Image: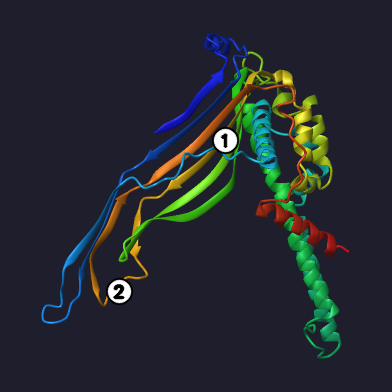
Amino acid sequence: MKWNNSLNGEKNPSWLYNTKHNIDATTFMTAVKGNVDARICSASVITQAITSAPNFTGNWAEYRWDGYPNYGSPLSINPPSASVLSSARNLAIRKFLQNVNDIRTSVEGGQLLGEWKETVGAITNPLGALRKFTVRHVLNAKKRIRRIQNSHGGRSRNRRGSKAAQSRNKAVAEALSNTYLEFVFGWIPLVKDVNAAVIGLLDRYDQPDRTIIKGHQRVGYDGTNTEVQLFNNGSATAYQSLLTISEVDYRFRASVKTGAVNGVRSVSRTLGLLPERFLPTVWELIPYSFVVDYFVNIGDIIASYAFQRQNIEWGSRVVRIKTEKTFGDVQMRLSPSFNPATTRLLQMGATGGGATVGAYSVDRVPIWVDSLMPDLAIHLPYSQKAWYNIGAILTQKFCSV
């Protein structure tokens, strides 16, 4: 069953020709719809009364229910808040620009050159923090052994809580944090960059001059998970699970120039040595800039500001919003009032009854000049890895004091 279906917008009968010749064919369009997709239900309960001697059995009774459960009145869209809409938009822009950068370059060469000293150090002195700790620990162990031998039977281990033990624990924590940071921000990015550079240089002769780039993000809000009752006949209860959720889906789609000329991408472009990458590279080279990005999206704003809008030939921004109620198939269970001393359960079961009731809207517009500039957002990191990285940096900071 459907209701409130409508679609308004501009028609472009030449859209196929336009897109084939890289001409913007995007038009304005808004649409809404509501619908119910339901399955008929059948439920039954068969019981028999327990009587006194001599037969101990009495009449049996069947309670049967057939039809569609009451799914409530037609839904209306629960609009997202400004913060939810902004979050979905920012994340969609980040993915879109990252996908564009991936197709236009293979590696952040400027960042790699900017961190040249650290890169050389990682290659010539791998696992430097762990190696330094191991050598220092061996030397300190030798000194303690010599001190014990010279003192003729001195104690061979430090007391718990002594300054030597505290110093050793501090050194262990510092070595672990430094080694972790070296792996996460040194070796892993270096290996990925080298691998991407090699693949990019091998594939740079077989590149399209333009390609379709997408970036989208779904954000759910105002979700609930409850239970609704169909009937209770005293012996059994029929019920359904009910999941209600609202969601916004923010999408960008565009035809983007890859920077290749006649199918060939230059070496400098492949390695990311481009003027358009200057500002994002400078931000990445600032110490602990990634920690700032965990809380404020400065990096995303800089990347969007540096993006060359003329690389987009045509594009669209689509926002889909939905509010849905999902009813599970009908389930059965014994009622709290069921008395096994007076009633015997012979049969209980149900099939069908599940349904999806939804209200949906979609809004499409062309990409404007400011469509790809994210909103300033302040938030807490939502991934465990971010907190691991922050913890390692704090450990390194306090251990070195």
Residue 71 falls in which quadrant of the image?
Answer: top left
Q: Is residue 187 above or below residue 162?
A: above
Visual colour scheme: rainbow
In the rendered image, residue 207, in percent from the top left (x then y), is placed at 60, 21
Q: Which mark is residue 110?
A: none
Relative to residue 224, is residue 182 drawn left or right? right
Position of residue 218 in the picture relative to residue 378 (left or right)? left
Which residue occupies the extreme bottom position in the image?
A: 153
Q: Nearer the viewer, residue 398 or 353?
A: 353
Q: Amino acid at mark 2?
A: Asn
Name the outermost residue toward the left. Answer: 54
- Residue 55 percent across, percent down from the top left: 11, 78
The quadrant where residue 395 appears: bottom right
Question: Is residue 383 or residue 135 the one in the foreground?
Answer: 383
Mark 1 or 2: in front is 2
- Whether residue 115 can be seen here: no
Q: Is residue 4 left or right of residue 235?
A: right
From the image, tell me which residue sits under label 1: 321
Q: Nearer the viewer, residue 280 or 324?
A: 324
> Which residue is identified by label 2?
339
The kind of secondary structure element at disc 1 is strand
Residue at point 71%, 56% (across, down): 387
In the rendered structure, which amino acid carries the disc numbered 1? Ile
Position above or below: 218 against 180:
above
* Image marks 1 and 2: residues in contact by CB distance under 8 Å: no
Image quadrant in which you'd find residue 204: top right
**In the image, residue 380 lies at what x, y percent?**
73, 51
Determine the residue positioned at 16% across, 81% down: 52
Cα separation between marks 1 and 2 = 48 Å
- SS of the residue under disc 2: loop
